[in-house]
Image (cartoon, rainbow, N blue to C red):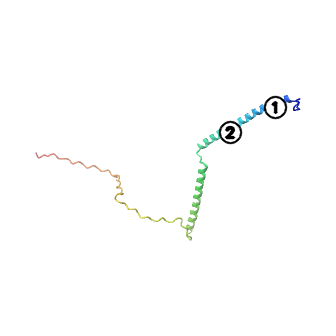
Amino acid sequence: MDPKLGLRWSYNMQSQNKFFDDLAKVLNGLAGTMAGVGREAESSARERAKEWFGGMDFVSREEFDAVKDMAAKARAEADALKKRVDALEKGGTKAPAARKPAAKRPAARKTASKAKPAARKPATTRKTAAKPAVKKPNSSK
């Protein structure tokens, strides 16, 4: 019995405390190591999944949302055009014009300096070569 503490098993408890302290340190180290191994396995699995999905030609979320918005706009335009066509087919009601016709611009004049030379047309028939003139020998000598 320890007179200062009033404990009967002071030596025995110290040895057990040291054993448990060492055991706790080992288990803490093991838990930290296992957590590190788990994080490493997770990051490795993520990297492999990215490589695998990257090879499968998937699109990103931003690209998907952009195409989805474009499709929604196209569908809205198609619905508006369908309503307009239905109104025109009924004949009695006049459908509102979707667009005003563009104003006509006067045709641009070609100047002599900007005129392009006429392109040569390829020959469609085969031309025969002209026969060379044959000189007749002078027989009047």
**Residue type (three-letter) at the residue carrying disc 2:** Arg
- Image vertical order of residue 69 relative to residue 99, above or below: above
- Image vertical order of residue 138 relative to residue 19, above or below: below
- Image vertical order of residue 141 relative to residue 118, above or below: above
Q: Please name the residue shown 58% across and 64% down the image.
A: 83
Front: mark 1 or 2: 1
Task: Name the residue beneath numbered marker 1.
Answer: 17
- Where, by quadrant of the figure, is residue 57 drawn? top right
**Could you tell me which quadrant the N terminus lies in?**
top right
Label 1's element? helix
Q: Residue furthest front?
A: 4
User: Any mark on residue 100, and which?
Assistant: none
Q: CA distance from mark 1 to mark 2?
A: 33 Å
User: Any mark on residue 39, and which?
Assistant: 2
In this rendering, would 130 be left or right of 75?
Answer: left
* Residue 111 percent location from the top left of the image: 35, 60
- Image vertical order of residue 66 relative to residue 30, above or below: below
Q: For label 1, count other residues whose C-alpha is less than 10 Å away and answer few (under 14), some (14-19) or many (20+).
A: few
- In primary-sequence order, the first of circles 1 and 2 is 1
Q: 87 or 76, which is in the foreground?
A: 76
**Residue type (three-letter) at the residue carrying disc 1:** Asn
Q: 24 or 138, which is in the foreground?
A: 24
* Residue 47 percent location from the top left of the image: 63, 40
